[in-house]
Image (cartoon, rainbow, N blue to C red):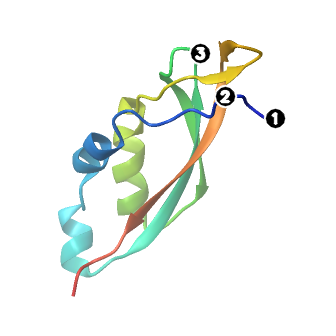
Amino acid sequence: MNLEKEPQAVNMDDLKKMIGYPPMAKEAGIEGKVVVRVLIDKYGHYVKHITLKEAHPILNNAVASKIDQLRMTPGIQGGRPIKVWVTLPFDFKLLN
């Protein structure tokens, strides 16, 4: 579906801070990428999500436990806000 205006994350920086890097994953040297598909309502609020790409369960759980805090601008179709799915990656990389 082509939207006139794609949803934009309003609080992605805050969300990533809330998720953080799970201490157990950091201590164990666990890295990975979790990709979630999130359904956003016409107000830009989280409805539900599915995980498209999993990493270690600690990382998956860190994202799943906070993703409902996501806030976005709504997707616009035909001049009106609509419910839409968005795909978001969360990278967990340790700094050397």
Please state, as top left, top right, bottom left or bottom right, where the C terminus lies in the image. Answer: bottom left
Identify which residue is drawn at 33% across, 77% down: 30
Identify which residue is drawn at 23% across, 80% down: 95
Question: Mark 3 or mark 2: which comes first in sequence?
Answer: 3
Report, in whole angstroms, how far the alpha carbon at label 2 lies from the one at label 1: 9 Å
Residue that badge 3 annotates: 42
Q: Quadrant of residue 75?
A: top right
The residue lying toward the viewer, choosing from 19 and 56, is 19
Q: Quadrant of residue 67?
A: top left
Q: Is residue 78 above or below residue 58?
A: above
Residue that badge 2 annotates: 84
Mark 1, residues whose alpha carbon is within 10 Å: few (<14), some, or many (≥20)? few
Left or right: where 22 falls relative to 58: left
Residue that badge 1 annotates: 1
Question: Mark 1 or mark 3: which comes first in sequence?
Answer: 1
The percent coordinates of residue 57 (x first, y second) are: 42, 62
Q: Which mark is residue 88?
A: none
Q: Amino acid at mark 2?
A: Val
Callout 1–callout 3 Cβ contact below 8 Å: no
Callout 2–callout 1 Cβ contact below 8 Å: yes
Residue positioned most to the bottom: 96
Q: How many marks?
A: 3
Report, in whole angstroms, how far the alpha carbon at label 1 lies from the one at label 3: 15 Å
Mark 3, residues whose alpha carbon is within 10 Å: few (<14), some, or many (≥20)? some
Q: Is residue 15 above or below residue 35?
A: above
